[in-house]
Amino acid sequence: MPAHKPEEVHRLFADAFNAGDVQAILSLYEPDAVLVPQPGQVVQGQAAIRAALGNYLALKPKFTMQPTSVLQSGEIALLFSKWTLSGIGPDGKTLELAGQTTDVMRRRKDGTWLIVIDNPFGVG
């Protein structure tokens, strides 16, 4: 299901992430989108995003995302959401992460929204 409002993207992302559905997650990104999978690392394009997200999906995580604000100007939106992730790390220990994402989205001609820049750590 496509997002018809910017804030719907994060709800759809969380649903797909919890389902482990990488294809549904990728459908929320533009083809040349940029993702910051960890501070200081940037990947671009759906193949690289798939690989980066695969590391997180391997944790079989429980993921929550709560939009906090949206700034929109025409076809571009900046969305802020708080998120939490809990899962089991490769060492068998519980892993807990949390942060605030800062994402740039663009409305397509069909009225749906896709992620252009995804920075789950909210910093440069």
Image (spheres, rainbow, N blue to C red):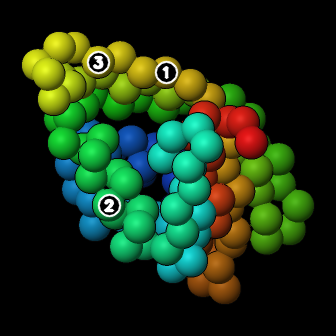
Considering the image in quadrants, where does the N terminus appear?
bottom left
Residue at the (79%, 71%) spot, across then down: 75
Q: Secondary structure at mark 2?
A: helix
Which residue corresponds to mark 2?
Answer: 51
Considering the image in quadrants, where does the C terminus appear?
top right
- Of marks 2 and 3, which one's residue comes earlier in the chain? 2
Q: Which of the 4 quarters of the picture holds residue 58?
A: top left
Can residue 8 be seen in the rendering of this structure? no
Residue type of the residue flagged with mark 3: Leu
Vertical placement of residue 67 versus 50, above or below = above
Q: Position of residue 36 (x, y in %)?
A: 56, 49
Q: Which of the 4 quarters of the picture holds residue 63?
A: top left
Q: CA distance from mark 3 to mark 1?
A: 10 Å
Camera-side residue: 3 or 17? Answer: 17
Q: CA distance from mark 2 to mark 1?
A: 21 Å
Left-right relation of 20 to 64: left
Residue at the (54%, 69%) spot, across then down: 44
Which residue corresponds to mark 1?
Answer: 98
Q: Secondary structure at mark 3?
A: strand
Q: Find residue 95 and name its label.
A: 3
Q: Residues within 10 Å of mark 1 (few under 14, many from 20)?
A: some
Residue type of the residue flagged with mark 2: Ala
Q: Residues within 10 Å of mark 2 (few under 14, many from 20)?
A: some
Q: Which of the 4 quarters of the picture holds residue 48?
A: bottom left
Q: CA distance from mark 2 to mark 3?
A: 20 Å
